[in-house]
Image (cartoon, rainbow, N blue to C red):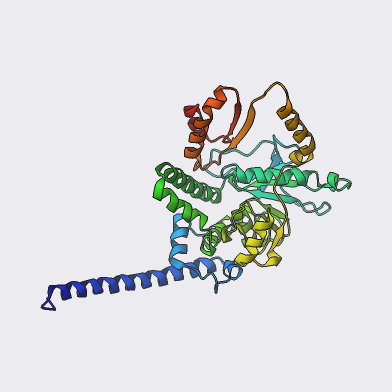
Amino acid sequence: MLFEKDWANVLFILACVLVGLFLVLKVAQQYAKCLYKSWLANPSTPLDVDEFVDTDKNPPKYLKIAFGHMLMGAGRRKPSEGSVKLASTESPHVPGLQVTERAEARPGSTSKVSPNAVTISIDSAKPDPLVIGTIRMGFGHHRIAYAASSWALHADEDTNKTSSGRTTYFHDLLNIDTPEADLIISTDAAYSKFSRITSNIGGLVEKMWGSFTLSGDGDALRVSALLSTHLRPLFKDLDPDTPIIATHCYVALAAVAAGFTNVVNLVIDNHAQWFVVVPGCMNLVQGPVNYQNFLKMGVNPDDLQLAGHWIPRDMVLNIPSDCARRIARAKDSNFKPRRILIPVGGAGAQRKFIVKFVRSLAPLVKANKVQLFLNAGDHVHMQAAFKDVL
């Protein structure tokens, strides 16, 4: 031993271990920094998150970025420089709305091109088409996209103009059968899985996951931007001046990275964090408090506007009559049960809470005092949870 006293040898060994760990950390940080710089340069795009979030106030934590990007499954993936030829077919749900898809079947895929799909081509004699970009993750982003589409389809009517002939495309990135869509699916699956697992475990684990998902800081936006760079082929078949309305930050990030110059990002969350705003486009927020919080956070006022809530057109037009019917129902001398609509996100993180909530309401439901409407879209695992408690 180096020293006569045992405690001195213990301290020396401990010091060596700490120095070794410190050196390993520094090497890892430097390696992660090199990875980040390499990802930004290959390929180089107009998307500049570092300038947007101000690196002086929000310096990149390279280890966190590298870990996040690898966790998303894109760290070792080379972004494609190609484009995907797009076609469209009329929505079976919304008359007049064109839904995009791949123009040619993907080699080796079981998905088929719709028999009535028409390859998208830009007619210079008509106004630029409007693209509502979304990703079907849960049902929130899709709901907002349909709300935006409902206004776009009636824009001429609402402004007392003759029909302009503008085409509105519903561009769900997951509907384009590509490796890029596969990347989104694997990312969403990982998020949903962790959300459900931590929710079921509860306690400290759930709080830690909640803290991680709510800390949408500058690094979270950097990770999202790196991932979204891989999604550029899903936009490159369109003219870069085409207006894009994004209902998911990945959509806006991918469009800006692909060189689009007229992008509007509908900020989906009322919790102000860097993760939900996008550089290089106009970010529309729903409420004045959220707007002020984004400004305090450091978002440039030129990149931000207060717009209001993303409500479908038919719901807005029917507010007076719907409210009158609700009031009349509540005042009806023949008592009618109170109606409660409970929507649940597709990730399923709320399952544990909703099951408890429904179970606690069971006596009132059986007594015909409350009527429940449970909406979980087409997510089978949530349907099973509802049936179990009912």
Residue at (56% x, 36% y) in the render = 376
Based on the displayed image, in which of its 4 quarters is residue 221 positioned?
bottom right
Which residue occupies the foreground of this view, 169 or 270?
Answer: 270
Residue at (79% x, 34% y) in the render = 321
Left/right placement of residue 325 relative to residue 173 reads right
Number of numbered discs overlaid on the protein picture: 0
Would residue 96 be visible to someone looking at this image? no
Left/right placement of residue 359 relative to residue 96 reads left
Position of residue 238 measured from the top left corner of the image (x, y, whole percent): 69, 54
Position of residue 50 measured from the top left corner of the image (x, y, whole percent): 57, 69
**Which of the image's four quarters has the N terminus?**
bottom left
Residue at (44% x, 55% y) in the render = 71
Would residue 199 be visible to someone looking at this image? yes
Position of residue 247 measured from the top left corner of the image (x, y, whole percent): 65, 50
User: In the figure, 94 relative to 221: above or below?
Assistant: above
Which residue occupies the foreground of this view, 91 or 189?
Answer: 189
Based on the displayed image, in which of its 4 quarters is residue 335 positioned?
top right
Position of residue 226 measured from the top left corner of the image (x, y, whole percent): 53, 61
User: In the figure, 245 relative to 22: above or below?
Assistant: above
